[in-house]
Amino acid sequence: MKKVWPILVVDDEEVMCESMAAWLREDGYRVDTAPDGQMALKLAQSTDYAICFIDLKMPGGMDGIETMMEIHRLRPEASTIIITAYATVDTAIQAMKEGAQEYIVKPCHPQEISMLVSRILKLKKLQSENAILRKKISRQYRHRDIITKNPRMEEILALTREISSIRSTVLICGDSGTGKELVARAIHYSGDRAEKRFVSVSCAALTETLLESELFGHEKGAFTGAEGQTKGKFELADGGTIFLDEIGDISPKLQADLLRVLQERRFYRVGGSEEVSVDVRVIAATNKNLAEEVQQGRFRDDLFYRINVIELRLPPLRERREDIPLLAEHFVERIASELGKDIAGISAGALKLLIEHDWPGNVRELENVIERAIVTSRDGTLVESDFTWLNQRSNPTQSWEVPDLPLAEVERRVILAAMERKKGNVRDAASSLGIDRSTLYDKLKRYQLEH
């Protein structure tokens, strides 16, 4: 994959600075320039530069070595190259000791610069592809692998760091495709159970009989085809974490069995008479409103309270639109690398189109959309035309006419509509309205609305 690698040139000699930038731009790179260390740091705060060319001697109180060290503090992955007209062994040793990757002497030759940049970026590309491959194979995701700048998601990630090393059961709620398993893996691999197994089970994918055997294992002869003893997922996750995805879909019998495991940390294999003890942390996930399922008698209240010790509620992608450009760029880089496609990035117009889409399938849908665009793209950059089919399948946004009513009546109707949409669930209604529950309770009381 060809990535848009940004490069920074820092030199107080304007002619030298602009000449080097022009050579690099001719090679197709995006290049920024800075006349001193202070300006270089400002640029590095907002741009993740792949390579920084830094002049050793610059006026203004910050020399090249100090500038390099400060940029490394901001951008540890950046490769820095010290350039100077005064080459000595001592300065070369100092530059390398402080983290410079290369040390070149003025006057610089365009061919030398091109070959040096090409060599560094080839290595970075291999490192990036290897990191993606290792992540795909191990699926060991930590907090730093979750891409977001949304305040609600950042609060959730802060909480997951706090709970990563305790055994308390976690319930992750959210629409399909919001990344519930990714958060569960981040909790596991950031805690003291990281060296043990993370075992994932889809509770919605199996029948009651198969799911029981999948969770607890079985003995030889327990049912037709059971030719030997088989350990279940709880045993396999001993010492680690078991992730029960879509726990709201399990049968009443399995709810009772699961409650016993959570309470006693012991169970019987299917067809077995010997108790098996395990030390397992349970993380459950659901796209259902389990409190409502309890009210309707479809989910045991005692099991609900047992798994809902710590609740994390992930916002849908339409409520964290500021993350769409970050996620899109990440998926372009990863998927293009996996498919061997030469895709440099995604255009501003295409990003605008993606940001305006409502994403009913959330992050998973965005990932699939990016993959389809990469497969069908005939250009080196994804543009609006690569996503035209997305608009065609989207429902047109309906405009809302402001009614000729007092403001209080408008608010009452909006609250009533939110409560109806969320089937009376105050927490969910408050979340959709962007207010806290206590505020919604006050408004329900003020407008004499039942709840």
Image (cartoon, rainbow, N blue to C red):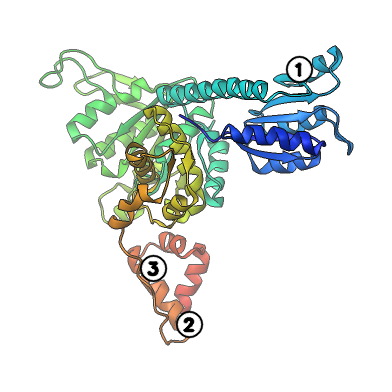
Q: Are marks 1 and 3 in contact (CB under 8 Å)?
A: no
What residue do we see at 50% from left, 38% from top? 146
Label drawn at residue 96: 1
- Nearest the viewer among 274 and 364 is 364
In 3D space, how far apart are the residues under numbered discs 1 and 3 (Cα atoms)? Answer: 62 Å
Disc 2: which residue = 408
- Along the polypeptide, which appears first: circle 1 or circle 3? 1
What residue do we see at 48% from left, 47% from top? 347
- The vertical placement of 230 against 163, above or below, is above
Q: In the displayed structure, does residue 90 sit left or right of residue 402?
A: right
Q: Are marks 1 and 2 in contact (CB under 8 Å)?
A: no
Disc 3: which residue = 418
Q: Secondary structure at mark 1?
A: helix
What residue do we see at 21% from left, 24% from top? 270
Circle 2 crowding by C-alpha within 10 Å: few under 14, some 14–19, many from 20: few
* Amino acid type, mark 3: Ala
- Along the polypeptide, which appears first: circle 2 or circle 3? 2
- Nearest the viewer among 387 and 358 is 387
Q: Answer yes or no: is residue 169 visible.
A: no
Q: Answer yes or no: is residue 338 visible.
A: yes
Q: Secondary structure at mark 3?
A: helix
* Amino acid type, mark 1: Met
Q: In the displayed structure, does residue 14 sit left or right of residue 293?
A: right
Circle 1 crowding by C-alpha within 10 Å: few under 14, some 14–19, many from 20: some
Q: Secondary structure at mark 2?
A: helix
- Nearest the viewer among 28 and 64 is 28
Q: Nearer the viewer, mark 1 or mark 2?
A: 1
- Nearest the viewer among 12 and 234 is 12
